[in-house]
Image: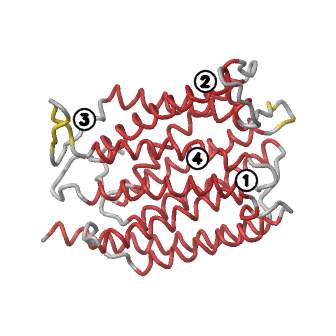
Amino acid sequence: MAKAKLDSTKRLGELSFGYFIFYVITGLSVKFFLSQGAGRPGLNGMEYLFYSTLSSTLIVTTFVLIRRWYKINSIRRVHFGKYLVPSELKYILPSGVFTAVIIPTTTLMYSFKGISVMVAMVLMRGSVIVISRVVDEIQIRKGLLKKKVYIEENIGVVFALLAIGIKIFSGGADGKASPFASLPVMVVFSVYIVAYAFRIYIMNYYKNTRPKESKVDNNKPYFAIEQIASTLTLFLVVVVIILFAKVGGVTGDRITPFVNAIFSPVKDWWYWAMIAGSAFGIVAFFSVFLFMFKGRTATFAGLVNRLTSLIAGTTSTVIFAIAFGGKFPIIIDWISLFFIFVAVYFIAKAEKKRTIELAMEKNN
């Protein structure tokens, strides 16, 4: 991957392939640890949330600290007390806080009883696709993004939303309730979508304000600083939850199993859950680098990211059904997948046009 140019189609393919593989592993891990039978542990969703989040954040944060990715080529330094610090910190650090919000709300969306996991997943993926298109429009109007969104990208958005809409409004055709009928689901989803909206805007603001002549990978320091801020935020949140539970005596369907995961780890399974959950940390590398892919619009990058995860989600469902006797995708899932591949076709056409555009820019 290191040998591919930062804005090349080859690098885009490498990132997408890595994201797909580790997202499939992540999806299989969630399905395995949250289900019962045939030697599976049947962990509570909040227990798995703690184990997987702990291992994934430790892996990511340790890696970026060891590699010193946090060293940023700032376009401007400002005074913070007696120190000169990169001006970018004023928005990258908040992005890390938003990331810390996104991580648990994602798992919470999967934990509500009566709501299909597949429907929750496509609802979240669809919201990010819409957000990415809106971010492009805002930054084009502000003069931050100098590129136009190709018609093929807009068509890709339409087909992606058709694929997602089929799933959401059918309820997955599995007899489970619509997520729009549940106030708690909509509250969590609203928090998720607001956090993601700010994060994607910040990512693209950073990307679109980097010097065009820069030859270094500016995404690495962004990723490192964001993840360090996210880890610190999550640590503080866990401390607060523990204080509420142990000192304040607060209990609940989600607080109690979360705290039990810390003080009463599930025998013989907690460390396996941490090992499996570490794949989610590796996914973060590919996910962020796809969202911030050089020379592409937020619309394009958001589509590549979310469509890859949707295909990976279906793949993990099929593998789990074959290997562990889970349910195979139903007809609605396959129809949705067809529309996803149509969307992929159009973003592939957009990528061909963009590479020609980039080549012309470099020759001028």
What whole-number distance in Å separates the C-alpha atoms at marks 4 and 2?
33 Å
Q: Position of residue 185 (x, y in %)?
A: 69, 55
Q: Residues within 10 Å of mark 2 (few under 14, many from 20)?
A: few
Rendered position, 283 above or below 59: below
Residue 243 numbered tag: 2
Q: Residues within 10 Å of mark 3 (few under 14, many from 20)?
A: some
Q: Residue furthest front?
A: 248
What whole-number distance in Å separates the C-alpha atoms at marks 4 and 1?
15 Å
Q: Position of residue 3 (x, y in %)?
A: 30, 46
Disc 4 vs disc 1: which is toward the camera? 1
Mark 2 vs mark 3: which is more N-terminal? 3
SS of the residue at dot 1? helix
- Quadrant location, the C terminus: bottom left
Residue 117 numbered tag: 1
Mark 4 vs mark 3: which is more N-terminal? 4
| Residue placed under numbered mark 3 in the picture | 71
Nearer the observer, 336 or 189: 189
Q: Residues within 10 Å of mark 1 (few under 14, many from 20)?
A: some
